[in-house]
Amino acid sequence: MSLKQRAAIIGSGNIGTDLLMKMSRSEWLEPVWMVGIDAASEGLQRAAAMGVNTTADGVDGLLEAVKRDGITIAFDATSAYAHAENSRKLTELGVTMIDLTPAAIGPFCIPPVNLASLAGAGLNNVNMVTCGGQATIPMVAAVSRVQAVSYAEIIATVASKSIGPGTRMNIDEFTRTTASAVEQVGGAAKGKAIIVVNPAEPPLMMRDTVHCLVEGETKQQEIIDSVHAMVAEVKKYVPGYKLVNGPVFDGKKVSIFLEVEGLGDFLPKYAGNLDIMTAAALRTGEMLAQQRASGAQEGGE
Amino acid sequence: MQSSSVAVKLHDMSLRDGMHSKQHQISLEEMVAVSTALDDAGMPLIEVTHGDGLGGASLNYGFPAHSDEEYLNAVVPKMKQAKVSALLLPGIGTVDHLRMAINCGVSTIRVATHCTEADVSQQHIQFAAQQGLDTVGFLMMAHMVTAEHLLEQAKLMVSYGANCIYCTDSAGYMLPAEVSLKIKTLRDALPDNVEIGFHGHHNMAMGVANSIAAIEAGARRIDGSVAGLGAGAGNTPLEVLVAVMHRMGMATGIDLYKIMDVAEDLIVPMMDHPIRIDRDALTLGYAGVYSSFLLFAKRAEQRYGISARDVLVELGRRGTVGGQEDMIEDLALTMARERGTLTGAAS
């Protein structure tokens, strides 16, 4: 019998489809349902062609299948607005939600920083922050685990074509959610997030800059080593994650310049911002699945 | 056109765009002195914000000497006839910052996006318009798109509630014929109750000429800065524009001698460096690069030994947009490493 946990993806747009393609290669998760709201959508048709069950009735179309098909994990790639209801209905049935929207009902999850501790906590909802958060918070944490960070600021520059209407209409959610995760997960006493949208053609690769202000004497070599180790951790699930320049030291300021190239599964390679979200969400789901497969151990670290 | 019947509203940028040239270090005393003198000279609208808009206080753009709230609270109560505006760039500031500025008593909110990305401004334009404020959609780097594309983006901002649309020459790249075409395209297609504005930079010495072209094509709000205090080679110098407009018989409501004195007696002594078209500022205009990159490129030149001009030209080639100040150091580091003047490496 397969040890794979059975999963549903809610949202049949670009993110949901990219996630489906990644999950179809997973050793730990099996995508069994794709949920949309438009029967004619390309995303649902593509999922059906891949042999996945589909419904165009939103999350309500999935509820009766949860028990029958043994769904234990659901990934929500809809919107913050829709997530609250989706989460309420599915967690009631015992499904664990991995939230790719900025709803942030559950705790923030940045896999190389806090997934291990979250996975052991028996939560029914975890939030994947934002694309900018996934790309930069590992670096904030890499500095803050060496010495206290009084302030951290991240600047995410993304290709215009990689930012959908939902994010555009709610761009404040991006800056607020990311800044608060820079503090809560990154470990900075105060956080700030900036997003810049660039329409250049050909589209530019996602670029991220991380600035930290540290307290006390800057421990340069330890920060360099910590940053390189963290880059290697992120590369495990986002191979195109690259340290372009830095860490650069200027007094108490530490600056790190990054580029994120996507895998190009369904989304183009320049959309590293979307790829890092789907990859991080998948890694989170896999960690939960792995734990369940290995029995109800105490887990966590 | 009967020039004398034209009523053009001028909008001073010296205390917002001027913040770029002062690395955001204008003191409260300077803010109050300049704004009260402008008020007395008849300036109808004065912008007071961090150079990069509300919430711009950051390592990326520079921490200001005082918060936006402190500046606004110092200036707004002192105004006798002038109104105060605040700028906001979605992605940097949020609706929370708008709420603060409105509580401080600003009358105008200007929401700025890159000229192709108007749809990130919906939350902010809607909020300001719903609060009953004079709400401006500010389309930056407008030289990068066609007039038709600019119009399409302007229509989005109007649909969210903007009552005025700006064609913004952030790079000081445009020549008068382009300004005329873009302003006329906006004027002809947008409803009569939507005003059209123009914001120029002086990197190609076209600030005044472009502003006149904009007025003749139908713009009724024009940005400028006393003594040009602003990013790059500065904004359109307001005292010069006022003199030209008066010679052309256009009403401005501004006392020319008084604004000349503000420029000479207050602004010029505040300058950290002469605001002029040096080779780097000229490069901004020539290569179409965001004007506030100037001082960042000069600092990168000092630190990494790569000429500011080379960095700016490359930023232009890459289609860099406003807000990407972090790319300047990143690019200078990469260029220095490629040229072998920097050791140490990336992974």
Image (cartoon, coloured by chain):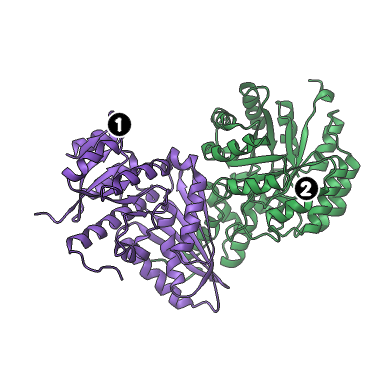
Chain colours: A purple, B green
Q: Check the image and name the residue furthest to the front.
A: A92
In the rendered view, would you say A295 is above or below B34?
below
The answer to whether residue B318 is visible is: no
Q: Nearer the viewer, residue B285 or B211?
A: B211
Q: Position of residue A201 (x, y in %)?
A: 45, 41
Query: What's the amino acid at mark 1?
Result: Ser
Q: Which numbered disc covers residue A86?
A: none
The answer to whether residue B168 is visible is: yes
Q: Nearer the viewer, residue B219 or A233?
A: A233
Dot 2 falls on a residue whose secondary structure is helix
Asked if the residue under mark 1 is in contact with the one under mark 2, i.e. CB atoms within 8 Å, the reply is no
Q: Nearer the viewer, residue A61 or B291?
A: A61
In the rendered view, would you say B176 is above or below A144?
above
Query: What's the amino acid at mark 2?
Result: Val
- The part of the image, by quadrant, that contains residue B145 is top right
Dot 1 falls on a residue whose secondary structure is loop
Q: Nearer the viewer, mark 2 or mark 1?
A: 2
Q: Position of residue B210 (x, y in %)?
A: 71, 35
Q: Is residue B45 left or right of residue B125?
A: right
Identify residue for label 2.
B76
| Residue located at (19% from left, 39% from top) | A50
Q: Nearer the viewer, residue B192 or A73?
A: A73
The N terminus of chain B - image quarter = top right
Within-10-Å neighbours for mark 2: few <14, some 14–19, many 20+: many
Label 1 chain ID: A
- The part of the image, by quadrant, that contains residue B60 is bottom right
Identify residue for label 1.
A41
- The part of the image, by quadrant, that contains residue B4 is top right
| Residue located at (54% from left, 60% from top) | B329
| Residue located at (66% from left, 49% from top) | B100
Q: Position of residue A268 (x, y in %)?
A: 34, 44
Q: Is residue A75 left or right of residue B218?
A: left
